[in-house]
Amino acid sequence: MAEIVIVGGGIAGGALSIVLARAGFDVVVLERSLQYEDRVRGEWLAPWGAAEARELGLYDALRDAGGHTLTTHTTFDELLDPATAEAAGIALDTFTEGIEGPLCLGHPASCDLYERIGRDEGVVVRRGVSSIRVEAGAPPTVHYKDSEGEHELRPKLIVGADGRDSTVRRQLGIGYHEDPVHHLFAGLLVENASGWPEEHQAICTEGDVTFLAFPQGGGRVRLYAAYALDQKTRFSGPHGAQRLIEACVMRCCPPSQALAEATPAGPCRSFKNSDTIAKHVSLPGVVLVGDAAGHNDPLIGQGLSITMRDLRLVRDALLRDSDWSPTAFADYANDRRERLRRLRLAACLQSRIEADFSDEARILRGAFMAEVVANPELPSGLTAALGGPESLPAEMFDELENAFDFPEWPAWPLPPAQDA
């Protein structure tokens, strides 16, 4: 028996299990995998997300487990002299009070950490489960298989925390919108890059690639490269990882020379840049969190921070309201939709500046770079990514929406149970 069953034991599910167990709930986690793997994402927690993790009581554990803090940022570009770019760099401790900067920790390490802490807090974790089947209702039902046979649980609430291809969302028929894909994004962890400044992150555009570098400590750096849709096989195949490393060594970015001798330390994978959103985050007896409820364009790295906010709002809803119906999650649903709207606009802006390699985009980027150099405090998509969706006035996002031809999201109504 369990009050709450969480489907998915990754970062969202594992972290939520700790938060809810500490709040006094009986929690069971169902996880398909027997070992967590490098997902090539989910390793950079923005300052505003770090503040959310701190409020949830998770931040210190991440730091103690080897979380690596980044303190400075530079945007390099072929249109800027490197010295000028470095002079316009920013300190990352200015975005959220009490947070020194973004926190980096490998995805498998984070998942293992959350599982260990969860078990210590009394969470029951079932690994290697299969044939998960979820039914909404009061109470909801979840069926699954494991090495001991077939099982059925009827908790008070099921949480879908099973990622972008959420089984829970699909089985419940919850609609899902995906924006048109603007570019592709490849990721790779490298080691032996000891010449890269340990606490310095960077974005750099040259030719037809924009790369992002996030040091992990000990000479390890997570690299991401944005590239055009018509080059979908550029970083695939047995030599894809080496090609990605070579693409990130740029003349306009002096620190990138340290990558020339780096070696792959994990898989090289590419994925789409697009934003997505689920039609509903809650049905009777079920709520979605993290990527299962929709995700932001990975170019601005908001996945972990969005998830941490999700967990806080869901926890607060459960503590505030005893019926746990969709109505109880109305505030969470409204906050999440507005939050993703703002971050979507920030990501769309950054995509057009940093991940569009046409001549027209190059002119736009040059004008933007000149403004940034002249006024380093200029609000931008990067400001929202670091400081959070509320760090800029709502009017700025409205202006962005009007200034650019952004694709519209469906005007989905709230579920009937939430209309009141």
Image (cartoon, rainbow, N blue to C red):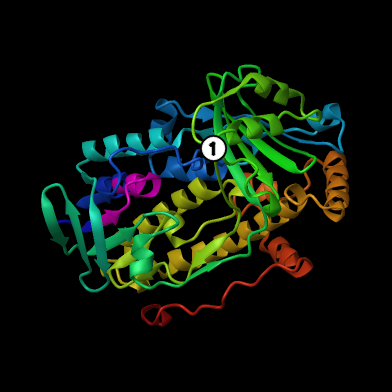
Residue pushed farthest front? 238
Q: Is residue 1 left or right of residue 141?
A: left
- For the question of whether residue 99 can be seen, the reply is no
Q: In the depicted view, which residue is nearer to us: 125 or 261?
A: 261
Q: How many marks?
A: 1
Q: Is residue 313 left or right of residue 198?
A: left
Magenta region: 5-17
Q: Is residue 8 left or right of residue 96?
A: left
Q: In the depicted view, which residue is nearer to us: 93 or 197?
A: 197
* SS for callout 1: loop
Q: Position of residue 348 (x, y in %)?
A: 69, 57
Q: Position of residue 305 (x, y in %)?
A: 51, 47
Q: Residues within 10 Å of mark 1 (few under 14, many from 20)?
A: many
- For the question of whether residue 173 can be seen, the reply is yes
The residue carrying mark 1 is 268
Residue at 60 percent of width and 36 percent of height: 240
Residue at 88 percent of width and 49 percent of height: 367
Is residue 179 within the magenta segment?
no
Q: In the depicted view, which residue is nearer to us: 130 or 55?
A: 130
Residue at 76 percent of width and 43 percent of height: 208
Q: Quadrant of residue 145?
A: bottom left
Quadrant in the picture for the N terminus:
bottom left
Q: Position of residue 101 (x, y in %)?
A: 58, 34
Is residue 11 within the magenta segment?
yes
Quadrant in the picture for the C terminus:
bottom left
Specify the amino acid type for callout 1.
Answer: Cys
Q: Position of residue 271 (x, y in %)?
A: 56, 50
Residue at 50 percent of width and 63 percent of height: 335
